[in-house]
Image (cartoon, rainbow, N blue to C red):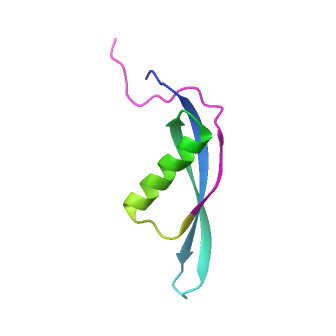
Amino acid sequence: MATKGTFYEATVEFEINNNGGKAKKVKEYYLVLADSVTYAEVQVATLLEAEGASPWTVISAKKSKLTNVVTELIDK
């Protein structure tokens, strides 16, 4: 997969209510292809807003050490 941009890792913290009604914080991690760390944060925020996710906060975003992601098998 040829990529244009850089991979960034975004960490998102969600607030989820358990069965007892007590709030619990859960982290999820997103891999984002973007031109900048700011744009990576915007992409994650846009996705979560469109999904109507529970209360969330992007708590960090950093450049990933990954250089490529293989998404499909290429037949030879």
Vertical placement of 45 versus 14: above or below?
above
| Depicted 45 relative to depicted 31: above or below | below
Relative to residue 14, is residue 12 depicted above or below? above
Viewer-proximal residue among 12 and 45: 45
Question: Residue at the spot x=62%, y=70% of the render?
Answer: 25
Quarter the N terminus occupies: top left
Residue in the picture at 45% in, 58% down:
48
Q: Position of residue 20 (x, y in %)?
A: 55, 88
Q: Residue at x 33, y 16 (%)?
A: 75
Q: Which residues are magenta?
A: 57-76
Task: Say how many tags the image has.
Answer: 0
Q: Position of residue 67 (x, y in %)?
A: 58, 26
Q: Tell me if residue 61 comes above or below residue 26 in the rendering.
A: above
Residue 68 lies, in percent from the top left, at: 53, 26
Determine the image quadrant of residue 18: bottom right
User: Does residue 53 appear left or right of residue 26 in this picture?
Assistant: left
The percent coordinates of residue 44 (x first, y second) are 50, 50
Q: From this viewpoint, which residue is outermost toward the top? A: 76
In the rendered image, which quarter contains the C terminus? top left
Which residue lies most toward the bottom here?
20
Magenta stretch, main secondary structure, is: loop
Q: Residue at x 54, y 87 (%)?
A: 21
Q: Is residue 50 magenta?
A: no
60 drawn magenta = yes
